[in-house]
Structures are given as structure tokens and as C-alpha cells.
Amino acid sequence: MRERYETLQSQGLDWNPPTLESANQPRCIIDGKSTIMLSANNYLNLTNHPKVVEAMVDATRKYGAGSGSVRAIAGTMDIHLAAESKVAEFKGVEAALIYSAGYTANVGLIPTLVQGKKDVIISDELNHGSIIDGVRLTKAQRGVYSHNDMGALEMVLNQYSDAERKLIITDGVFSMDGDIAPLAEISKLAEENNAMVLVDDCHGEGVLGNGGAGIVDHFSLQGKVDFEVGSFSKALGVQGGIVAGSADVRNHALNHSRSWLLSGSQPPGVAAAQKAAIEVLMQEPEHHERLWNNTNYFRKELQSMGFDTGVSETPIIPVMCGDSSIAKEFSNTLSMEGVMAGAIVFPMVARDAARIRTQMSAGLTREDLDEVLRIFEKVGPQLNLI
């Protein structure tokens, strides 16, 4: 283990995360220093919203710190069911099931949807690692199509036309580039080829759709997407995974998904905060509006300076650097200037596609953004990026 770690260190590929010493909010304390946070998934700044925090505290006092069991046996509480009911209302579906994390939702659900070599899973080449891990747990055939290339998807579907079950899986918003899957076209091809569709909407909830309802709402595809996987730990500001769809989907996942059946249930305080976060989003649309105002302003200003923001369409805004060493130097310089924006380098992305990944938040003020932009404008020429 030491040798492997030292090899990573020598290549500059080891993780050495900074220490957050305050709430994860737009202005926070990292390693003892006041910092503007541009690396959080906290898109709507709900992590410390008073209603969310108060719901967690109140439920903890009433129910205790933990549930005491897995949900399938004795760990399901009324507060878990209330949170799931609110998720279904928010998503506009019949039912939902909450997992311990978005990761466990993917690795738990995907293996239950196919049975063996007569089935096929068809996956976008840039899908999240949790999807890849879920696929690896199956014995199904595997087809991969070029990123967001619908011609390539159609070719793979034709290649596996004789498969008994066909499952197409895609991220909704791709976390490294901030682009959006063409879900309407995917859904159409699935219908034409008798395939199921699973979309991972972890970076779409609270971001896309009317009031943040997600990618299915964004494309008006309610009832046409079989499985929506999501997460509370990003825009919704809490923690936990989501599977949403029909009542049949919930019943199936509840009875067959090992990562749900064999995991202790969410602490009651977390379940209460999950429900409260969705209620805040549904009742206070200004958070969603501010997120997109900040996103459009920041991306436009970066582009006007000459920075390359790639194919981003969402609050995930990469600043393309090319070489990993440049991205790391950029990130380190930003940190010294009081801005947290992480370098994304090989092997997370291609060798020539390193970038600084910035993520917008509804809690960032125009003054915060202008301060960051001044720093980017100062540092960019030093690295020959603008």
C-alpha cells in the first residue's frame, strides 16, 4: 500500500484534501483561512438554511440520533416515509425510495434490473463511477456509446437488438464538463428499441427543470423515464440517495436492492432535513433563480476574458487548462488568493483535458463573483490561459 501511495505522490496524483473548519457555504474557513468556495455541490446553499437545520435538530430530539436497525426489519420510521412522499411529489412520480447515498442507489439498483448474458446495459462513456461500479456487479452484456452521441447509441442498440432486456444508462448532468444528456432523444430511441432508461440526476436536482425538479421535468418527459436516481448531498444540501419512478419501481428496489436492504437506515434528523430541503426548494424559488443568475453571469464574464469553459451548460463551469501541471498550479494560486477551486486532472479526465472545475451557488453574492473574476483575470495571463 505504501509503495502504491508513494507512486501516486511521485506522479502528483494523490489526494490531499484541505480541511474545512466552518459550514460549507460560499464564504467559509479552509485550513484557517477565509475562502470563497467554488468547489462545493451546494448549489442552492441549503446546507445551513434555518428551516433545514431546525428540522434536523427537532427530529433528533424526538427520535434520537439513529434508527437502530435496517429499514427492512425495524428501522423504517414515519419520518422516512414522509421524506419519500415529498420526493415523489417534487419529482412528479408515483413513488420514491431513499438510500444511504447516491452511490449506493446506483450500485444497489442497477444489478437488479438485468439478469444475465441475455440482457445488455448500454452506457454513456462519461458516466459517473458509481454507474460503472453498478454495471460491473452484473453479468449482463455491456455496450458503451460515445458521449452524448445519439448516432452511436442507435448503433449499439442495433448491435444488441436481440437482447432480452436492454437498459440505457446516462448521467443527466455530467459532473466534469457540466453538459446535459439529450434525454428526449435517448427516451425516443429507447421507446423505438424496447429499452429501459435510467438517468442519474444527481447534478440536475435543484438545478434543471421548473423550480429545480430535475432533468426529466427539464425535457417534459414525466412518465417516459423508467428510473431516476438522485442525491440529497448536492443541491438539496443534506445527504442520501434517491430512486424515483412508479410504485412498481419502489416495490422492486425495496425488495431486491442489497445496498438498501443491508444498510442501516438514515438518521431521523437526516430524513427530516431531506423533507425540509425539498419543501424549501418548492416554496422558495428564489434560490433556484439566484443560482442561474450567478451561473450565467460568471460563465459570460469568464468567456469575455478569453477563458475556455468547454461545453458547460449548467452551474458546473470548467476552466480548461489542458496540462495537469497547469491546472494544479492554477488551483494552488487561487488557494493562496483565497479561492477554493479544485484541479481536475488525469486520470479523472483525459491527459490533455485538465481543468479547474468551478461550481456556482445561489449563496454567492455579485461581490463574491466579482472578486473571484478579478483573481482569475490576474492569474490567467501568468499561466498563458488568456
Image (cartoon, rainbow, N blue to C red):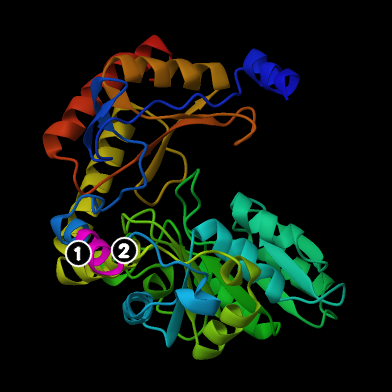
Report the side of 376 relative to 253 (left or right): left
Q: Is residue 59 magenta?
A: yes
- Specify the quadrant that holds the C terminus: top left
The kind of residue on which mark 2 rests is: Gly
> Is the Cβ of the residue at disc 1 closer than 8 Å to that at disc 2?
no
Residue tagged by mark 2?
64
Q: Main secondary structure of the magenta part?
A: helix
CA–CA distance between discs 1 and 2? 10 Å
Which residue is rendered at x = 27% and y = 16% of the image?
A: 337
Which residue is rendered at x = 49% and y = 30% of the image?
A: 355
Residue 223, percent across and down?
47, 86
Q: Which of the two labelled residues, at mark 1 and mark 2, occupies the earlier sequence position?
A: 1
Which residue is rendered at x = 40% and y = 17% of the image?
A: 332
Which residue is rendered at x = 50% and y = 17% of the image?
A: 326
User: Which label sits on residue 23?
Assistant: none
Identify whether 79 is placed above or below 274. below
Residue 220, percent across and down?
40, 79
The kind of residue on which mark 1 rests is: Asp
Residue 366, percent across and down?
13, 38
- Specify the quadrant that holds the N terminus: top right
Residue tagged by mark 1?
58
Identify whether 374 is placed above or below 259. above
Residue 285, percent across and down?
17, 65
Q: Is residue 56 magenta?
A: yes
* Magenta stretch bounds: 55-63
Q: Quadrant of residue 357?
A: top left
Q: Nearer the viewer, residue 265 or 86?
A: 265
